[in-house]
Image: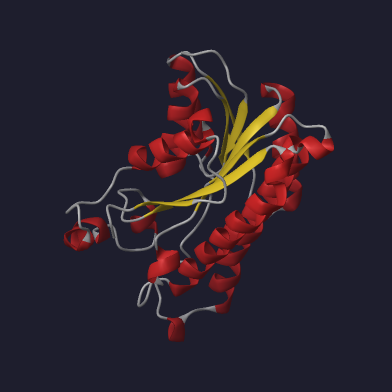
Amino acid sequence: MSKAIGTVVVTGASRGIGAATAGLLAARGWRVAVNYGASEAAAQAVVAAITAAGGQARAYRADMASEAEIKAMFLAAETELGPLAGLVNNAGVTGGMSRLEALDAEALRRVFTINVDGAFLCAREAVRRLSTRRGGAGGAIVNVSSRAAELGGPGEWIHYAATKGAIDTLTIGLAREVGGEGIRVNAVSPGLIETEIHAAAGDPDRPARMASGVPLGRSGSALEVAEAIAWLLSPAASYVNGAILPVGGGR
């Protein structure tokens, strides 16, 4: 383990890209606030793996649809782990697979509330702590977008793709808003990645079925996305701000 860098909040960190990111950041010296919405056992398993390897982490429940829970999570994390230095805005849901003509209004509201409202509120809490204008020491935010924002998700999840388009806009706008206050804001845009998100959306075989359409000829791993996130958080990316980095094998 390297010397602790600072505290980073990773939302949606009980599985998939979030879990891989939490583990990698801990190994590189970050103190990690492992956020989860419902899967406490999975989040605690991520924490246990980190601490067994000599890292520092704690699990925090916060529903991304609840402003009060998001605010409480950030307060608890900085109290128990130390001053915030970074945020990985990863939590999200697909809202299930559906053509637009069959989309349920409640599903639409839920996917936008969690994916967009939650990301905005987490970014707000991070800025309030990191901004040099507000007495902070600066830091970095990495939003997890999706290649769906450009591809559109036709026939599957146009609604999900639209939320990721909003994340791209948030990334660009916030980067320009707070870049002069010591905060870099960037995004990763994963493509076809082997995570539980496909099964949760009702199509567990989707990565294998669609891999032939990726120029590299395969789906990616959560760790490959985590590596990109870790780089954007690191000093190695010190002049990168407002970037949306595709991690999709060329798709």
The number of callouts visible is: 0
> Looking at the image, can residue 181 be seen?
yes
In the picture provided, is 169 more to the left or to the right than 189?
right
Q: Residue at horizontal 49%, vertical 72%?
A: 159
Residue 207, given in percent of the width and then of the height, sits at: 25, 56
Does residue 46 appear in this view? no
Depth check: give the residue in front, 248 or 223: 248
Quarter containing the C terminus: bottom left
**Residue at x-position 16% and y-position 60%:** 212
Q: What x and y, as percent, mark residue 210?
A: 22, 62
Colour pattern: secondary structure
Where in the figure is residue 19, as x and y percent of width and height? Answer: 44, 37
User: Residue extending furthest right?
Assistant: 134
214 lies left or right of 84: left
From the viewer's side, name the closer residue of 164 and 93.
164
Occupied quadrant, residue 183: top right
What is the residue that sits farthest to the bottom in this orientation? 101
Q: Is residue 166 left or right of residue 72?
A: left
Q: Position of residue 104 (x, y in %)?
A: 52, 78
| Point 66% across, 59% down: residue | 117
Q: Is residue 189 above or below residue 17?
A: below
Where 248 falls versus 109 (above or below)? above
